[in-house]
Image (cartoon, helix red, strand yellow):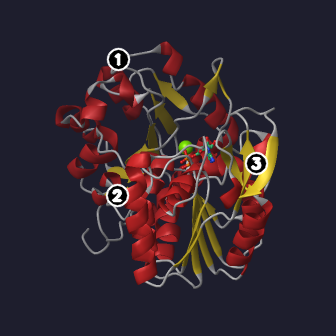
């Protein structure tokens, strides 16, 4: 199952094609958050030190299969050069004559960034002729784009199958090993915390984790549907009536398997979905017909913190409330603090959850913050990731 990593192969003097995830947020043409670029640095630095000829490829945003100057990777090149403290060549084309010449011009230890691979329609279609063009400029393929590993695209999947050796980068390796170890052989108690807006987004994650964990803590909007399934009145809260049967089934499954499932016992209620709404705290039996639950209450915070305190492994995906608004951020912050205090492995997945942890200033107190939102969800669902499946397995080279 384990893919070979970049540490297992000889890269000196080789043309090493590295699929990275440089899909950074851009604001008015400049990079507003370079976390994803920083996350790829260890692999790039390692390859440079080893004297590889490094070819970097990534997508950025959603161009419609054709060049879009607003989604050029050119600003990423500048930031990358700054972070690496060395020159990074940039090619305005990712295939064709220009790209072939740019690759041919590389000396050992040089770094080249190709333009946005999604400027070609075939990338997202996993077109084999497109992948073959990249294969011709590749001696060793490295996938370090965990955030794109759940997609079977030409640079994430097709290309990997056309080259003699395809390995995981250091970031990819860490994502897979930390999350893999937690799921396969966790230190116990193993606690999962699942939140976010909707149950429907995460049913498979809950199902898969229920089989593995000792305790499951549910918060956020999705808790409402479970509470409704238990017969509580949720007023105007976000609920998914079409998920009630599934919520009931999941609770029954947990009972049979003797897993502890915790739901909120109190909530922060608002009269409307707004930062300046009038708020009050009430037990879940006291929700008014016109009110909506937008965060877990203080009693729930204490209950959840106690359920987290003795954990040796924690996986957290999804905020406990509408953390974007300060009035409904306390539940998520309290859980973040409890997770930060855990003496064990703590793993955070999900775009909004990661944002919430950063907002709370606790990112560096977690064992692992996944760089892949969608990919980490699919991994937690127990699904095989196409970008990982396509890599050369240990013992297979
Ligand atoms: P992640 O990105 O970490 O996987 P999700 O995208 O599933 O998380 O959910 C995050 C969103 O859920 C946030 O925008 C948050 O405001 C929203 N949310 C959380 N609790 C509630 C609630 N009680 N009612 C409505 N929305 C909620
Ligand atoms: Mg999200």
The residue that disc 1 covers is: 66
The residue that disc 2 covers is: 388
Marks 2 and 3, how far apart at CA: 36 Å
Task: State the residue in front, 260 or 44.
Answer: 260
Element on which disc 3 rests:
loop
Task: State the residue in front, 194 or 327.
Answer: 327
The residue that disc 3 covers is: 329
Residue 312 located left or right of residue 362: left
The N terminus sits in image quarter: bottom left
Relative to 59, residue 266 above or below: below
Relative to 194, residue 121 above or below: above
Proximity of marks 2 and 3: CB atoms separated by less than 8 Å: no
> For the residue carrying disc 3, how many other residues have a C-alpha within 10 Å: few (<14), some (14-19), or many (20+)?
many
Proximity of marks 2 and 1: CB atoms separated by less than 8 Å: no
Residue 303 position, x and y percent, is 73, 72
Sequence-wise, which precedes: disc 2 or disc 1?
A: 1
Task: State the residue in front, 236 or 4.
Answer: 236
Q: Quadrant of ligand 2?
A: top right
Marks 3 and 1, how far apart at CA: 41 Å
């Amino acid at each position: 199952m384990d893919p070979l990593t970049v540490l297992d192969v000889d890269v000196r003097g080789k043309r090493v094609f590295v699929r990275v995830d440089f899909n950074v947020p851009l604001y008015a043409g400049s990079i507003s958050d370079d976390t994803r670029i920083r996350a790829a640095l260890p692999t790039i630095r390692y390859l440079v030190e080893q004297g590889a000829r490094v070819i970097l490829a990534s997508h950025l945003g959603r161009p419609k299969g054709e060049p879009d100057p607003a989604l050029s990777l050119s600003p990423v090149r500048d930031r990358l050069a700054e972070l690496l403290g060395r020159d990074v060549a940039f090619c305005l084309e990712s295939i064709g004559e220009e790209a072939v010449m740019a690759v041919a011009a590389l000396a050992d230890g040089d770094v080249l960034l190709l333009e946005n691979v999604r400027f070609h329609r075939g990338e997202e279609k996993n077109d084999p002729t497109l992948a073959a063009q990249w294969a011709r400029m590749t001696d060793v393929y490295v996938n370090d784009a965990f955030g794109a590993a759940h997609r079977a695209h030409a640079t994430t999947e097709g290309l990997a199958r056309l080259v003699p050796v395809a390995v995981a980068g250091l970031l990819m390796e860490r994502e897979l090993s930390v999350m893999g170890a937690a799921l396969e052989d966790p230190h116990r108690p193993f606690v999962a915390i699942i939140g976010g807006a909707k149950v429907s987004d995460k049913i498979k994650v809950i199902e898969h984790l229920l089989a593995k964990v000792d305790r499951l803590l549910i918060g956020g909007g999705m808790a409402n549907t479970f509470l409704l399934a238990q017969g509580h009145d949720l007023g105007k809260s976000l609920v998914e009536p079409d998920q009630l049967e599934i919520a009931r089934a999941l609770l029954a499954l947990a009972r049979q398997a003797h897993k502890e499932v915790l739901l909120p016992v109190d909530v922060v209620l608002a009269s409307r979905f707004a930062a300046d709404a009038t708020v009050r705290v009430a037990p879940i039996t006291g929700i008014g017909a016109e009110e909506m639950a937008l965060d877990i209450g203080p009693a729930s915070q204490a209950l959840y913190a106690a359920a987290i305190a003795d954990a040796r492994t924690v996986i957290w995906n999804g905020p406990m409330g509408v953390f974007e608004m300060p009035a409904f951020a306390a539940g998520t912050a309290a859980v973040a603090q409890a997770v930060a205090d855990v003496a064990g492995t703590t793993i955070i997945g999900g775009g909004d959850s990661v944002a919430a942890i950063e907002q709370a200033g606790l990112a560096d107190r977690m064992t692992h913050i996944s760089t892949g939102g969608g990919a980490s969800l699919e991994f937690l669902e127990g699904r095989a990731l196409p970008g990982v499946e396509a890599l050369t397995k240990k013992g297979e080279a």
